[in-house]
Amino acid sequence: MQYNSTRNNNETIEGHQAIIEGLAKDGGLYVPSVFPASIFQEALVNDSYQELAYRILHAFFDTYTEEDLRNCIHLAYTNRFKTKEITPLTINGKYPLLELYHGPTSAFKDVALSILPHLLTSAYRMNHNQETVAILTATSGDTGKAALEGFRDVKNTLIQVFYPSEGVSPTQKRQMQTSLGDNVNVVAISGNFDDCQRVVKQAYQDAFVQSHLHNVILSSANSINIGRLIPQVVYYFDSYLQLVKQGRLHFGDRVNFVVPTGNFGNILAGYYAKQIGLPIHRLICASNENHVLTDFIKTGTYSRNRDFHETMSPSMDILVSSNLERLLYHFANGDGAYIQALYQEFEKSGSFSITPEMKELLDTHFVGYWASEEACAKTIHDAYFIDHILLDPHTAVAYYAAKQYEAEFGSAIPSIVLATASPFKFSKSVLTSLKQNVPEDEEEAMQQLADYTKQEIPQGLAQAFSLPIRFTKTVTKEAANQAIIDFIEGGLHVSD
Ligand SMILES: *Cc1c(COP(=O)(O)O)cnc(C)c1O
């Protein structure tokens, strides 16, 4: 299995190398040069989540030994998730709900960020590298905490997260400040998310930082890493097989998946699942008021030239969906030069249009809908009072899209809705949508939602308010490089 950049299909590298490099040097993303053969067969019905993960990871990353891959899977998916199914499928509401939020930070990013650190450290070992890997991550909320949990106490790694001092929710801030582990560090930057991202990107090139790196390599846990994408393919297969096991689906029948989408990573994993044999009819792309993807799917023109909206589904507040570049590369039959030109155009004008042939492929595989804030709130309300299920705002956007799809195309093909976060992570928005009192204090809001719904607060979220705060440092972006060096030099004494 070879990988190449979306912007250059002449040079290929192995999968483990692509995981180490993260982003290609030409600015493109790594993609499989050809997809593995179909793995879809009836015997999969007897697989555990871990067994299925092995089959899929092995198909995409064949340079790892079986022992190495199984060990990565064991470390990622033993005792870290609250349910033994890892990603259980529940059938209480109108649509089967694939619950991806039972990991340590109560959001779907845990599924991939639990295994990425192990894939990365095994890849380094494969190259006989002795260095410590220092992961620098900028976050606007969810990614930072999931990365901190994923890398915490992983041998020969250090992780430092930068978040905007005023740009994350109180719960998210608290989750990060109370992080455990001897190899972790969290720093607030007085600035916005873009400042954080710049701090991280510039550190890689900064001579002052580089001169202090002895036996330390900088890397990143960004969602553009192919090592974060492939582990997400697993739950598409697993949820399908759960439906078969429950007798709700015949093996071989087609299904739709409805995916609340921001950076296009999660839904792209669904497309990859389809490429290796899963009988998916349509991937339904659900957006909030930042509906750049809905418009793209409708018209074939992608344009970020529009207002940015802050919504109650903040992890989908995004105007440039990085992983879309991968889909376009596949639709363009692997024409790297074409993708390079398309993204040059995008840099210049903020928009691009695809060819009629590509638009046709888009229509074959995808359909898009978006929910206004009002529709999202009403969906949370009605899902609770009519369907008796509690949705977080991101999942509600998808649930709404599922209804839109059904109104347009009927319900002959079942639609599985991906639930990406625990409602308790967004307690205030959920309480507001349920038309309940909303306490000012975040912890009280969480408790109130628990009392009202008689559901339990996930342990990790409750803990954020009981564990001591460890990280309170705020620095200017100018002082960030010193913070990086201080952490790396201090951190080396505790890791072995
Ligand atoms: C990150 C995130 C999303 C969006 O996923 P993408 O892979 O970026 O499309 C949706 N919901 C939640 C809760 C998230 O944290």
Image (cartoon, grey):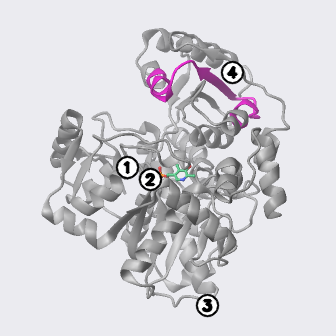
- The label nearer to you, 3 versus 4, is 3
- Say which residue appears at 37% left-offset and 57% top-offset: 1
Label 3–label 4 contact, CB within 8 A: no
Q: CA distance from mark 3 to mark 2?
A: 30 Å
Magenta span = 175-199
Disc nearer the start of the sequence (3/2): 3
Is 159 located above or below residue 62 in the figure? above
Which circle's residue, 2 or 4, is located before the other in the chain?
2
Instruction: Estimate the x, y position of residue 346 in percent, counting from the top left.
Output: 22, 40
Q: Residue at x 71, y 52 (%)?
A: 424
Q: Can I make out residue 55 in this image?
A: no
- What amino acid type is highlighted by mark number 3? Gly
The residues bearing labels 1 and 4 have C-alpha atoms spaced at a distance of 33 Å
Left or right: 233 as drawn, with respect to 490: left
Among the 4 quarters of the image, the one containing residue 169: top right
Residue nearest the observer in this picture, 225 or 436:
436
405 to the left or right of 389 = left
Residue 323 disc label: 1
Q: Position of residue 345 (x, y in %)?
A: 17, 39
Determine the image quadrant of residue 452: bottom right
Q: Which residue is mark 2?
A: 265
Q: Nearer the viewer, residue 29 or 371?
A: 371
Q: Which residue is mark 4?
A: 491
- Which residue does the numbered mark 3 point to in the structure image? 247
Q: Label 1 sits on what residue type?
A: Asn
- Secondary structure at badge 3 equals loop
Question: Quick check: marks 2 and 1 in contact, CB under 8 Å?
Answer: yes
> Label 1 crowding class (10 Å Cα cut-off): few <14, some 14-19, many 20+?
many
Look at the numbered discs 1 and 4 and tell me whether their residues touch, using CB distance below 8 Å.
no
* Disc 1: residue Cβ within 8 A of ligand 1's nearest atom: yes
Q: CA distance from mark 2 to mark 4?
A: 31 Å
